[in-house]
Amino acid sequence: MVPADGVRVGHQHAGDGRVRLGRALRTLLPDSPPVLATVTAYTDFDHLTRAADAGFDLHFTKPASPVEIADELSRYLIEIDVQDGRRMAALAA
């Protein structure tokens, strides 16, 4: 398996494939989970909740602009780095 820092998942049809994939990736990579983002046409609460429950970090609704996706991913990754820095400082203290 090739390690990945992030995964973007899109799907055309309703179903649990995206949810199963998210859960599988979280299970396979518990020590260094990738950032999971989904791009979907679904905006209802049920789909959003299932994606979050499966471990997806970000949700984009089609048509999502590539610039919006890149900006949000950048902000998310910066926040992760800040949080990791705080954890490392707390462990060192």
Image: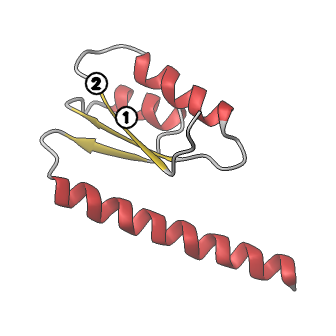
Quadrant assignment for the N terminus: top right
Mark 1: which secondary structure?
A: helix
**Residue 18 screen position, x and y as percent:** 41, 24
Mark 2: which secondary structure?
A: loop
Sequence-wise first label, 2 or 1 = 2
Count numbered badges in the picture.
2
At horizontal 61% and vertical 46% (from top left) the residue drawn is 33
The three-letter amino acid code for the residue at tag 2 is: His
Outermost residue toward the front? 2
**Residue 82 screen position, x and y as percent:** 57, 76
| Location of mark 1 (residue) | 48
The three-letter amino acid code for the residue at tag 1 is: Leu
At horizontal 57% and vertical 44% (from top left) the residue drawn is 3
Q: Dot 2: within a 10 Å radius of its alpha carbon, few (fewer than 14), some, or many (20 or more) residues?
A: some
| Location of mark 2 (residue) | 11
Quarter of the image holding residue 67? bottom left
**Side (left or right) of 91 relative to 9:** right
**Side (left or right) of 44 relative to 75:** left
**Side (left or right) of 4 relative to 32:** left
At horizontal 54% and vertical 38% (from top left) the residue drawn is 55
Mark in front: 2 vs 1: 2
At horizontal 16% and vertical 38% (from top left) the residue drawn is 62
Do the CB atoms of the residues marked 2 and 1 lie less than 8 Å apart? no
Where 62 falls versus 6 (above or below)?
A: above
**Residue 13 screen position, x and y as percent:** 25, 15
Quadrant assignment for the C terminus: bottom right
Q: CA distance from mark 2 to mark 1?
A: 13 Å
The disc label shown at residue 56, or none:
none
**Side (left or right) of 86 relative to 70:** right
